[in-house]
Image (tube, grey):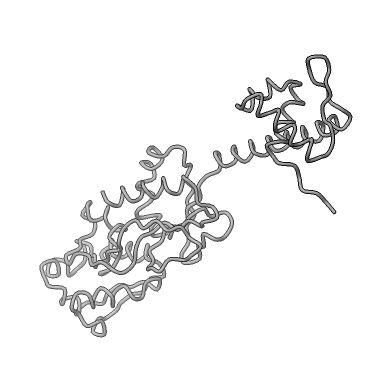
Amino acid sequence: MSRDLPPLNALRAFEATARLNSVSQAAEQLHVTHGAVSRQLKVLEEHLGLALFSKDGRGLKLTDAGIRLRDASGEAFDRLRAVCAELTHDSADAPFVLGCSGSLLARWFIPRLGRLNADLPDLRLHLSAGEGDLDPRRPGLDALLIFAEPPWPVDMQVFELASERIGPVLSPHFSGFEALQQAPAQALLGENLLQTTSRPQAWPSWAQQNGIDPQALSYGQKFEHLYYLLEAATAGLGIAIAPEPLVADDLRAGRLVAPWGFSETPAQLALWVPKRSADGRARQLAHWLKAELGG
């Protein structure tokens, strides 16, 4: 019947003593007392039922069993030290891979990437774009930035960053802009609204919140992704609906206008981090994102 390994502290005390050939030096290296090392050596000998040291004048001499254990433990601890150093180095040097939609990446993240790199230079953020196919559970992705509604997955650490607010936007170049910018929201019933297949409920949800019958809405051209939808709106091709952060820069620059404001939805813009790989970098990024969104 196999026996358990000796206590790790006893093995560490032995390895240091055998390597340095001194209980005092081992105690100094391990930041413990001389007596603590001596007690651990006694524990190890009692566990093994063997003498590992013999008296040699005022010092110690390894027995044959001690020599065998010294060689084995030295090799094992050297290997552990090397692997731990590699892991620490890899963790420090590895980029933090963040998944997000292409729309969020292009319209919100990239304009702020220089500021993020300046504020968090050690993060080494790498962005991975996708549309509905990004899963933080798959290898190679450290976190996901996503608009979603609770409840949250139990295997995720979720940092809630901002409530989602959506609203209609149009360009000053849109043919009906002058009439619409002063009109009530009901005026949208006379327009063919641009829509996206990735968020089919956006228009009906906004309409319901603003006292408009969703069934009365009329739709025009449909786009596969929100990014294309907003490019079309910016080009003056029609009225789109979008989350506020994705059009904030366009609103400030006057490329788009939001005459009817934005309405809060049950969704949150949140950072999803698998609990198995959550670390300080994710929390650091979440704090930066929340501050940036709040600004």
Q: Residue furthest right?
A: 64
In the image, is 54 to the left or to the right of 249?
Answer: right
**Front residue of 19 and 84:** 19
**Front residue of 215 and 82:** 82
- Compared with residue 292, is residue 213 higher up or lower down, i.e. above or below? below
In the image, is 46 to the left or to the right of 294?
Answer: right
**Which residue occupies 25% across, 64% down?**
236
- Compared with residue 63, is residue 84 higher up or lower down, i.e. above or below? below
Quarter of the image where the N terminus is located: bottom right
**Which residue occupies 71% across, 36% down?**
10
Q: Residue furthest top?
A: 57
Total numbered labels: 0
**Which residue occupies 60% across, 40% down?**
90
**Which corner quadrant of the image does residue 73 belong to?**
top right
**Which corner quadrant of the image does residue 247 belong to?**
bottom left
In the image, is 89 to the left or to the right of 9?
Answer: left
Q: Position of residue 265 (x, y in %)?
A: 29, 69
Q: Position of residue 81 (x, y in %)?
A: 68, 35
Q: Position of residue 109 (x, y in %)?
A: 38, 51
In the image, is 140 to the left or to the right of 188?
Answer: right
Q: Position of residue 104 (x, y in %)?
A: 38, 58
Q: Residue furthest bottom?
A: 215
Q: Residue furthest left?
A: 182
- Compared with residue 30, is residue 293 higher up or lower down, i.e. above or below? below
**Which corner quadrant of the image does residue 267 belong to?**
bottom left
